[in-house]
Image (cartoon, rainbow, N blue to C red):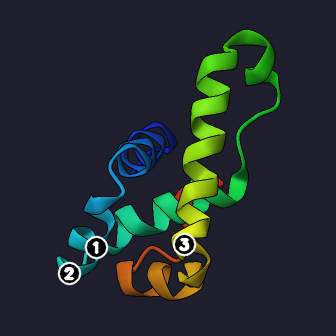
Amino acid sequence: MTARQEELVARDLLDHPGKIGVFFQQKRWKELAALVRYARREVPVELAQTDPALYRRLRGQITRFFLLGGDAFCLEALEAKAGDRGTAAAG
């Protein structure tokens, strides 16, 4: 999965948090790992200057993700289950 694909998956899951449980049940580990990586990476501060509305929206979605228990996801375990061990994080 490319970095752009990871971002799109993560942003879709942040837009629709109800899908996270479905992805977990379907064992879609790569997508869940992408979400956790994206949320931990934080929203680029530069986005606040270039697109303040998008910045606020993403910040709010990431905050909601963590408040709803997103910090319970173990990135290393998800990557191990996905079989990619973080190769997409480097790309």
Question: What residue would you read off at disc 2?
Answer: 25
Q: Which residue is more in the foreground, 13 or 89?
A: 13
User: In the image, what residue occupies the spot 62% across and 19% down?
Assistant: 53
Dot 2: few (<14), some (14–19), or many (≥20) neighbours within 10 Å? few
What x and y, as percent, mark residue 24? 28, 77
Q: Earlier in the sequence, mark 3 or mark 1?
A: 1
What x and y, as percent, mark residue 30? 37, 67
- Three-letter amino acid code at the position of disc 3: Gly
User: In the image, what residue occupies the spot 46% across and 81% down?
Assistant: 78
Q: Earlier in the sequence, mark 2 or mark 3?
A: 2
In this picture, residue 88 sits left or right of residue 31: right
Residue, far top: 50
What x and y, as percent, mark residue 7? 48, 42
Relative vertical location of residue 60 with respect to residue 52 in this rendering, above or below: below
Question: What residue would you read off at disc 3?
Answer: 70
Q: Secondary structure at mark 2?
A: helix
What x and y, as percent, mark residue 54? 59, 23
Mark 2 or 3: the one toward you: 3
Separation (CA) of disc 1 from disc 2: 6 Å
Badge number at residue 48: none
Q: Secondary structure at mark 1?
A: helix
Dot 3: few (<14), some (14–19), or many (≥20) neighbours within 10 Å? some
Question: What residue would you read off at disc 1?
Answer: 21
User: In the image, what residue occupies the spot 81% across and 23% down?
Assistant: 46
Q: Secondary structure at mark 3?
A: helix
- Three-letter amino acid code at the position of disc 2: Gln
Separation (CA) of disc 3 from disc 1: 11 Å
- Three-letter amino acid code at the position of disc 1: Gly
* Label 1 close to label 2 by CB (< 8 Å): yes
Q: Which residue is more in the foreground, 31 or 90?
A: 31
Mark 1 or 2: the one toward you: 1
